[in-house]
Amino acid sequence: MKTFILSLQHVLAMYAGAVIVPIIVAGGLGLSAEQTTYLVSVDIFMCGVATFLQVYKGKFTGIGLPVVLGCTFTAVAPMIAIGNSSGLPTMYGAIFVSGLVVVVIAPFFAKVAKLFPPVVTGSVVTIIGITLVPVAMNYIAGGQGSKDFGNPKNIVLACITLAIILVIYKFTTGFIQSIAILLGLVSGTVIASFMGMVSLTEVTQAGWFQHPTPLKFASFEFNISAILTFVIVGIVSMIESTGVYYALGNICNQEVKEPDLRRGYLAEGLAVMIGSLVNAFPYTTYSQNVGLVQISGVKSKKVMYVMVLLLLVFGSIPKIGALATIVPQPVLGGAMISMFGMVLAYGVKMLGNTDFAKQENLMIIACSVGLGLGVTTVPTAFAQLPSFIRMFTDSGIVLGTIVAIVMNLIFNRKSKLKNN
């Protein structure tokens, strides 16, 4: 029973993140309630598969630490943008290729880590956070295209949800604090039900069992610009995962060596590829579960294996997935502001490790974030350029990342020469 409770705690710690990404993406792509239910269920199921690939230390994959994998927030904006502009086949094709790229570059990634210092990774994550915020604002207003968009009751409901999350986060600690988002979503939905904004129709109509279906929504099509976008998301996830690996290694008193990193990266890339085959999402390590390991002191793989089993069971019951679809969009918007704002804040935190005394670093941040934000807010700015150039300029994330990497190579090399 103790193992079950500890495993359930891990599930609850990551559940809000695992559930909200498919809801946001489904809403942004205009999918039906039935399709949303499938996305939520298959995502929960795939979180279990992905986590198993990491926890089980095999010959080629798996770091063997209590790592939890879930869908990455950094992929939300690219999925919505590419899904709407190029279609689901292009979106899922790009996700599959990005997972393949992660698998291919895994053995070499440690050797090129110097290309991604904090000034680069921090700028990229900051850009990703900036592109997510407008999505949250649309939800707060009631959802883009909704009849009551901007209705004061939507704004009030979103603000109440956000206030509940902040109060829980401020006045609680430990496990309760770690599920503040989930509690905020539940509380906001209960309040919305008294306002006549909640319908249980989808829950009652949902079945009791389903399994992941290969290519349920779309097969694969390939577009270079879309692939580049998701490759960048994959590389950012690898960089973030590296920090999680080292943190867990320190907590578990286990030295993380290069072969461990390689197996961890391979497991992550394989999870992304499998996820795309069943029309799920890109996966990455969840840092909130690292904090849970540190707080609870429980490092047992047995707990993680039971957690995997729980995720597989929950993901096989559509009624559980359907529960997530009843959450009103303003409630989601209130929660998104805190979560997406944290992505932006995390990017700023990463930039905090940058040497701001060097004017070159300030210029790298200014140009990469400036251009990334510029393309996001004015997507037609480069519409008249040739198509082979627009594959790099149509996405603020792609353009900002390329600018950050190239400028870092130029300015850092210059700085070294000056110092010599």
Image (cartoon, grey):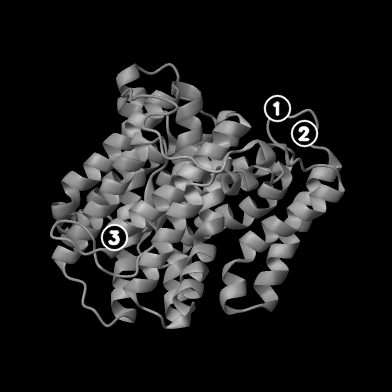
Q: Amino acid at mark 2?
A: Phe
Q: Nearer the viewer, mark 2 or mark 3?
A: 3
Q: Residues within 10 Å of mark 3 (few under 14, many from 20)?
A: many
* Left or right side of 106 for 347: right
> In terms of depth relative to the viewer, which is nearer, 417 or 194?
194
Relative height, residue 414 to residue 98 (above, below) = below
Sequence-wise, the earlier of marks 2 and 3 is 3
Instruction: Judge whether residue 146 can be spotted in this image.
Output: yes
Residue 145, numbered circle = 1
2 and 1 marks in contact (CB < 8 Å): yes
Residue contact between numbered discs 2 and 3, judged by CB atoms under 8 Å: no
Give the distance between the C-alpha atoms of the residues marked 3 and 1, in whole angstroms: 40 Å
Q: Amino acid at mark 3?
A: Gln
Residue nearer the viewer, 225 or 120 = 225
Residue 63 has which mark? none
Q: Secondary structure at mark 1?
A: loop
Q: Secondary structure at mark 2?
A: loop
Label pair 3/1, CB-CB below 8 angstroms: no
Residue type, numbered disc 1: Gly
Which quarter of the figure is the C terminus placed in? Answer: bottom left
Q: Which residue is mark 2?
A: 149
> x, y percentage for residue 301?
32, 72
User: Image quarter for residue 300?
Assistant: bottom left
Q: Tag 3, which secondary structure?
A: helix
Residue at position x 55%, y 32% in the image: 35
Give the distance between the C-alpha atoms of the residues marked 2 and 3, in whole angstroms: 42 Å
